[in-house]
């Protein structure tokens, strides 16, 4: 369920419409997704070399009106980082950014994962405001915030 995504077009449709991939490339990626047992289409498109990760992020920003943040330019309070255990942050690629009242701003690798959003809300006792960033920026922030690697 993608309740917080306002544009009902699929990510592949957005990428084709923006001329970032062809219909043939989309069909190939969907075939790979089906034969390899799922996985996120955006990750498959990047792995196949059809798009860059920033293209997927941009499409999600457009498709779901998710705000993009460059985590590398954001100072994160260690007390905020501590709201999500290091092992969970690394496993699920979550970065807690800021907390205002009962609202925790979080960058998620897959911002459309409603189950993960619910788990984070339960774990932290906060409502979650989701932001998006690139995988590389998330990985760098994880190393910076949780240097032990979540072990």
Image (tube, helix red, strand yellow):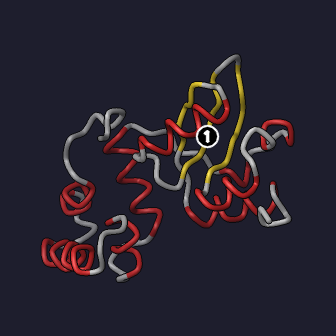
- Left or right position of 6 against 47: left
Reply above or below: 33 against 151.
Answer: below
In the rendering, at what x and y percent does residue 57 appear?
Answer: 44, 56
**Res. 136 image quadrant:** bottom right
In the rendered image, which quarter contains the C terminus? bottom right
Picture residue at 59% right of the left edge, 46% below the top? 107
Reply above or below: 19 against 129.
Answer: below
**Label 1 SS:** strand
For the residue pair 59 and 35, the one nearer the viewer reads as 35
Picture residue at 70% right of the left edge, 21% below the top? 100
Circle 1 packing at 10 Å, graded few (<14), some (14-19), many (20+), is: many
The tally of labels here is 1
For the residue pair 129 and 151, the one nearer the viewer reads as 151
- Left or right position of 81 against 42: right
Picture residue at 32% right of the left edge, 66% below the top? 41
Reply above or below: 47 against 110.
Answer: below
In the rendered image, which quarter contains the N terminus? top left
Picture residue at 54% right of the left edge, 40% below the top? 119
**Res. 144 image quadrant:** bottom right
In the rendering, at what x and y percent does residue 35 appear?
Answer: 23, 80
- Residue topped by disc 1: 106
- Left or right position of 72 against 65: right
In the rendering, at what x and y percent does residue 125 appear?
Answer: 65, 26
In the rendering, at what x and y percent does residue 50 appear?
Answer: 32, 78
């Amino acid at each position: 369920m993608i309740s917080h995504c306002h544009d009902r077009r699929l990510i592949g449709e957005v990428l084709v419409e923006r001329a970032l991939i062809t219909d043939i490339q989309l069909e190939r990626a969907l075939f790979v997704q089906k034969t390899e047992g799922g996985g996120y289409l955006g990750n498959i498109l990047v792995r196949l070399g059809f798009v860059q990760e920033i293209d997927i992020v941009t499409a999600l920003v457009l498709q779901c009106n998710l705000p993009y943040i460059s985590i590398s330019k954001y100072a994160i309070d260690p007390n905020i980082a501590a709201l999500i255990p290091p092992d969970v942050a690394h496993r699920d690629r979550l970065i807690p950014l800021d907390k205002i009242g009962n609202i925790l701003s979080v960058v998620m690798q897959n911002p459309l994962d409603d189950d993960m959003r619910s788990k984070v809300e339960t774990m932290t006792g906060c409502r979650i405001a989701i932001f998006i960033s690139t995988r590389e920026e998330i990985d760098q922030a994880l190393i910076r915030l949780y240097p032990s690697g979540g072990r």
